[in-house]
Amino acid sequence: MNTKKRKLNREHNVRIISDVTTYTTFPASKALSMETISRYFYMPITQAAMDLDVGLTLLKRRCRELGFRRWPHRKLMSLLALISNVKERQKMQGGEKAGIFKNAVEILEDERRRIEENPDLEFSDKTKRLRQACFKATHKMKKKNSLKSEMSIPSCSSSGSVLSEEESDEEVKYLLCGFTSEFSGL
């Protein structure tokens, strides 16, 4: 039986095991600081690992060492979509209640910055409810538009009632008012 001994070449951080050469990851993991990793939060973790030129497992291990369990890409993208949605609704409203929308955007931007600093933070309950209301309003608008297009085709019959745009926006406005008044003391 021919067994080769394991050697560790400390000069090059190379471990030789049989005929396979692998690089140890200890110096690379220490080079991954929170500032370095946080620049890549807005991309999927696999893409971030490729751009950082490290393995996915090493990146995940380093993230756990830094104190966060999950990669915040989806959370941050959801928050950016919510900010965009609130800004879009602000444009649709015009001058009416512009201050409420502006305050909501500022609060959401502040929450985005806090999540960038500490990715394990959860959304506040108000943010979760606002996000849900925006999703619901968007879904109702899409449903309304699809019902309109079905009604224009004579062979199709539409079932269900046509939902008013004002009805779905009222819930968002109500949540925005509560959202900004709760955080106005910050």
Image: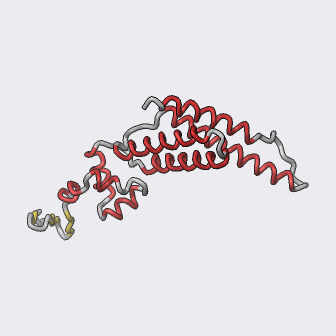
Seen in the image, is 64 located left or right of residue 172? left
- Residue at (57, 39) in percent of width and height: 99
Q: Nearer the viewer, residue 52 or 125?
A: 125
Q: How is the image coloured?
A: secondary structure
Q: Position of residue 58 (x, y in %)?
A: 28, 55
Where on the picture, by quarter, is residue 17?
bottom left
Seen in the image, is 60 located left or right of residue 11? right
Q: Is residue 125 above or below residue 96?
A: above
Seen in the image, is 163 located left or right of residue 118? right
- The quarter of the image holding the C terminus is top left
- The quarter of the image holding the N terminus is bottom left
Total tally of numbered discs in the picture: 0
Seen in the image, is 74 located left or right of residue 40? right
Q: Residue 18, can we see it?
A: yes
Q: Nearer the viewer, residue 175 or 144?
A: 175
Q: Position of residue 89 (x, y in %)?
A: 63, 46
- Residue at (61, 43) in percent of width and height: 135
Q: Is residue 47 above or below residue 158?
A: below
Q: Position of residue 4 (x, y in %)?
A: 12, 66
Q: Residue 1, can we see it?
A: no
The residue furthest bottom is: 19
The residue furthest right is: 154
Q: Position of residue 82 (x, y in %)?
A: 54, 46
- Residue at (59, 47) in percent of width and height: 85
